[in-house]
Image: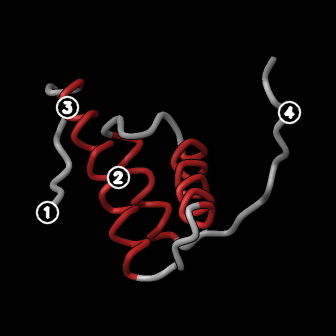
Amino acid sequence: MKEKQVAVPVKLTPQTIEEIDKLVSVGVFASRSEAIKFGIRMMILIEKIDLPISRIAEEYAYGEIKEKFARIRDVHRSRPAIRVP
């Protein structure tokens, strides 16, 4: 049984939307909604493991995102790759 979801309106800058759309267009996320939910889940995970939102948390999130990019690139070799340092 799927858990009930509640819509939460959010305002983002055009630049943020553009970045999210780039991730969606190359297949990192299926939709804007999935990308935003991923970011929120990352923040909750960081808080649950008791890391302050700081440089450590940013590095952790970066590592998670970098791994996701690598998996997507492996699956979708025919699509343009995202350059991740």
- Say left or right for 16 vs 2: left
Residue 8 lies, in percent from the top left, at 80, 56
Residue that appears at 55% across and 73% down: 13
Residue 81 lies, in percent from the top left, at 17, 42
Q: Earlier in the sequence, mark 1 or mark 3?
A: 3
Residue closest to the eye, 46 or 62:
46
Q: Label 2 near label 1: C-beta < 8 Å?
A: no
Residue 27 lies, in percent from the top left, at 35, 35
- Label 3: which residue? 79
Q: Quadrant of residue 72?
A: top left
Q: Tell me the crowding category of disc 1: few under 14, some 14 to 19, or many 20 or more residues within 10 angstroms, Cα based.
A: few
Q: Earlier in the sequence, mark 3 or mark 2?
A: 2
- Label 4: which residue? 4
Asked which secondary structure carries label 2, the reply is helix
Residue closest to the eye, 43 or 77:
43
Q: Tell me the crowding category of disc 4: few under 14, some 14 to 19, or many 20 or more residues within 10 angstroms, Cα based.
A: few
The label number, if any, that marks residue 65 in the structure image: 2
User: Whole-Å distance between the Cαs marked 1 and 3?
Assistant: 18 Å
Extreme residue toward the bottom, this view: 54
Residue that appears at 41% across and 42% down: 24
Three-letter code for the amino acid on which mark 2 is drawn: Ile
Asked which secondary structure carries label 1, the reply is loop
- Say left or right for 80 vs 67: left
Task: Decide: is 39 above or below 78.
Answer: below
3 vs 2, front mark: 2
Three-letter code for the amino acid on which mark 3 is drawn: Arg
Q: Earlier in the sequence, mark 2 or mark 4?
A: 4
The label number, if any, that marks residue 85 in the structure image: 1
Residue closest to the eye, 14 or 72:
72
Q: Earlier in the sequence, mark 1 or mark 2?
A: 2
